[in-house]
Image (cartoon, rainbow, N blue to C red):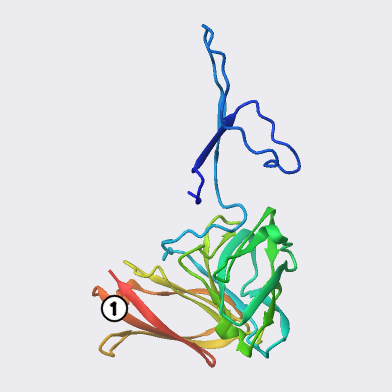
Amino acid sequence: VLPDNDSWRLYPADYAFPSPNPLAGGVPNSYTVDLAPGAYQLEYKAVKVGDVNCSALAGDFLEPTDRTVFPLYFPEQTLNAGETIKLPVFAGETTQWDGFQLALELLPGLTLETVSGGLNTSMSAENWHLTAQNVLNLSWITGETASIPAGEPLFYLHLSAAQKIHTAEAVLLKKGTLSAEAYPATGSVQTLELYPNAGKKDMAFLSPPQPNPTTGDAILRLQLPQDETVTIQLFTTDGRTAYLRTSMFGKGAHDESIPAEAMPQPGLYLWRLQAGDAIWTGKLQRF
């Protein structure tokens, strides 16, 4: 439910909304009837009210843990006071989406001027809203599935700096408000993560193990810009190696599992993946 508004709105069934702005004349929500004796048949329709302009500040969202993680990245740059930048946000993999949404927190010293679309993601002011807390709520959806190429800008942030600032420290994915997620043509919703990449387009990406916690296998999704030797390790909390695999992986996307057999006892495990010079580590909970 949005502030100062009911979740459902009722209006007369015969009401015709004006065009092009259907809310220009307000929405009638009452009938006037003659109290003379007789039978009355009142027909109405109902509309579920939602956040159509990304301005709602809903809290306490629980982030799902059993989705595939899709990486977004942006160049890591340093801005001096008074400088402006058109900061691109790229998709880490080639995909096809029907839409996406996310919230970005811009730290003090960085001002958002506007947001513009990328190669196949046309945007206008209706797609984003900047809150008083300097949080950018962004939502994009298309009537047709759009091809999102890896390495091509998904959207641009037009920013200005009031002081010397590093984009990697000042542009953060905001969680707990608007769930960061994408809607692929396959229908399986993906969780979005945002990474600075020091301006390099050709870099490896890793989605942390999913699901986490897990009762079975955990899947690591790896995207490689070139052939690499990849080592996957799993450790117990006392430092024992529970799983080790080293293989040559080709360029592209790979779904690799940490098998349930490597985690025979419920509890906390530590994982490590190395692809070339890139190293990721994290925790994995087995129920």
In this view of the protein, which residue sits in the foreground, 152 or 173? 173
Residue occupied by mark 1: 268
Residue 83: where, in percent of width, then height?
72, 86
Q: Is residue 156 visible?
A: no
Q: Classify mark 1: residues with Cα within 10 Å, few (<14), some (14-19) or many (20+).
A: some
Vertical placement of residue 231 versus 116, above or below = below
In the image, residue 174 sits, relative to residue 199, either above or below, namely above
Q: Hey, which residue is sitting farthest bottom in the picture?
A: 277
Q: Nearer the viewer, residue 27 or 44?
A: 27
Among the 4 quarters of the image, the one containing residue 192 = bottom right
Q: Residue at x 69, y 41 (%)?
A: 22
Report helix, strand or loop for mark 1.
strand
Q: Residue at x 46, y 64 (%)?
A: 67
* Residue that sits furthest to the left in the current view: 265
Name which quarter of the figure residue 185 lies in: bottom right
Q: Is residue 30 above or below residue 232?
A: above
- Image coordinates for residue 64, horizontal then vertical, percent: 43, 63
> What residue is rendered at 76% in x and 43% in y?
20
The kind of residue tagged 1 is Leu
Give the residue at the far front of this rendering.
35
- Examine the rendering and report whether any part of residue 62 can be seen: yes
* Residue 139, quarter of the rendered image: bottom right
Classify 269 as above or below 188.
below
Q: Position of residue 254 (x, y in %)?
A: 53, 75
